[in-house]
Image (cartoon, rainbow, N blue to C red):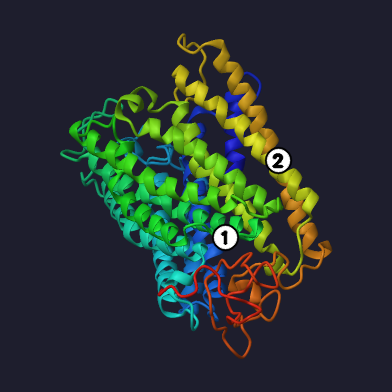
Amino acid sequence: ALGMSVLMRLQLGFPHFFSLIVPNNYYQFITMHGMIMVIYLLTALFLGGFGNYLIPLMCGARDMVFPYMNMISYWVYLVAVLVLVAAFFVPGGPTGAGWTLYPPQAVLPGTPGATWGIVLMLLSLAIFIVAFTMGGLNYVTTVLQARCRGMTLLRMPLSVWGIFMATVLGLLAFPALLVSAVMMTLDSVLGTSFFLPAVVSMGQPPTHNGGSPLLFQHLFWFFGHPEVYIVALPAFGIVSDLLSTHARRHIFGYRMMVWAILAIGCLSFVVWAHHMYVSGMNPYFGFFFATTTLIIAVPTAIKVYNWVLTLWRGDIHLTVPMLFAIGFIFTFINGGLTGLFLGNVTVDVPLSATYFVVAHFHMVMGVSPILVVFGAIYHWYPKITGRMLNDTLGRIHFWLTFLGTYAIYLPMHYLGILGVPRRYYAFGGTNFIPPSAEWANTAITISALFVAAVQMVFLFNLIWSLSKGKPAGDNPWRATTLEWQTPDTPPKHGNWGAKLPVVYRWAYDYSVPGAKEDFIPQNQPVDARTPAGREHGIKS
């Protein structure tokens, strides 16, 4: 997916020198890049990756409740990926309908990959949803049934809360995508008309009648907007834990943070049509969905304010994980503010399908979660491998990535305000695009190539530190949560040896007055040397 984005940027930035892809391939690359990044990378990475690793350790469990089903879910996910990649090797190649797969374009003969490509895409999505369902049921059951003694729901780290709620969202939202994938497959293969109206395509008489493309958009975005929070909620939880650990301060407003996660999850199901203001739906719906879009900003803002107040008067250690967490806050605020513009009907109409939308989407769904992924890897790499990542290389990686991504996406807002449309292969002969837009596209491409190259620093650090990194010890960050209290680093099979831990306190006892150390692990009993923190005495 990253390679396809580089080729697309070369085409846009230097169209006269790097015409490496033809127009049909360009739209196929857009489709595959978007689908891989959103579904097969971010969703799988936060839930399948961090979820599998962190939930048992943070909850004090030996493993997932259904480890065999957990293993099967991974192999089914791998099959889904192979089916998706197989589209590159069939006649016509992968679908070029865009990552949203809107009908009737997705199945009309003039669209690249309108035969095998779209069918393999839809089949891959269906298989992925099966894998997600198996894994998701496992996560929910483990959190609800396999917590160790003393680990009440309101003593769980916010990382677990974020992953748990994102899993619930996925279990409720993915069926809408599965249904729409099955219906579109029937339209494509058997000639049904769920989504296809009577249209003349390439001079051929209509072969379908009575379908509704708008129905597909409603089904897709009923899944699509919760998908934003399927990615965002685990990121919110991980950032909360990184900030608290590296600021040596309890998380501010823990209970409010939990309620904000639950509120965001519920509200994510009533905002989907703000993606459809220009689709032709009833215009009165616009007022309702614009209102709910503004309302969902309230619990999101609560989390941002609580993050800032967690840092307030903290003993902030600007470690590499902390830098990525702070970078996420800046980026998420910037991306969220542009979302307020797009949530307003009158502003969204002229900006729809421009580079303003591309910039907003990538700031919120691309840069922000990837910064959290990097921060989480730097934070938990010592527990996973027993070695520290190189700090100097980590700082170089952060600053060049953070500044480079802003050099990519800030100019895109300018392009959107100029009215430059997205998904264009080239802009030659278009009088409405000023020369400054062409220069901006060139600068964006140079920045994108730079950021892609910088990731080699991270990969080198990841591999080099595996054998040459400084030994980490059991708890190098002096953290309180259970994953840092295992008897072995890395944790052996079963995590906890002969006896499961017992939890006596919440996950954020940092800098407790009267304590000997500036952190008290969750499995440390309350006594004179380790007094109770803010949570003690609260019925949870």
Distance of mark 2 from mark 1, alpha carbons? 21 Å
* Side of 186 where 430 appears, left or right: right
Residue at left offset 56%, top offset 40% = 330
Q: Nearer the viewer, residue 311 or 530?
A: 530
Amino acid type, mark 1 = Asp
Tell which tag, 2 or 1, sits nearer the viewer. 1
Amino acid type, mark 2 = Trp
Residue named by callout 2: 399
Which structural element holds mark 2? helix
Q: How many marks?
A: 2
Residue named by callout 1: 241
Q: Which percent across, then down, holds residue 466?
A: 77, 63
At label 1, counting other C-alpha atoms closer than 10 Å, the crowd grade (few under 14, some 14-19, many 20 or more) is many
Q: Residue placed farthest to the top in the image? A: 431
Q: Which percent across, then down, holds residue 150?
A: 48, 81
* Side of 263 where 500 appears, left or right: right
Q: Which percent across, then down, holds residue 174?
A: 35, 57
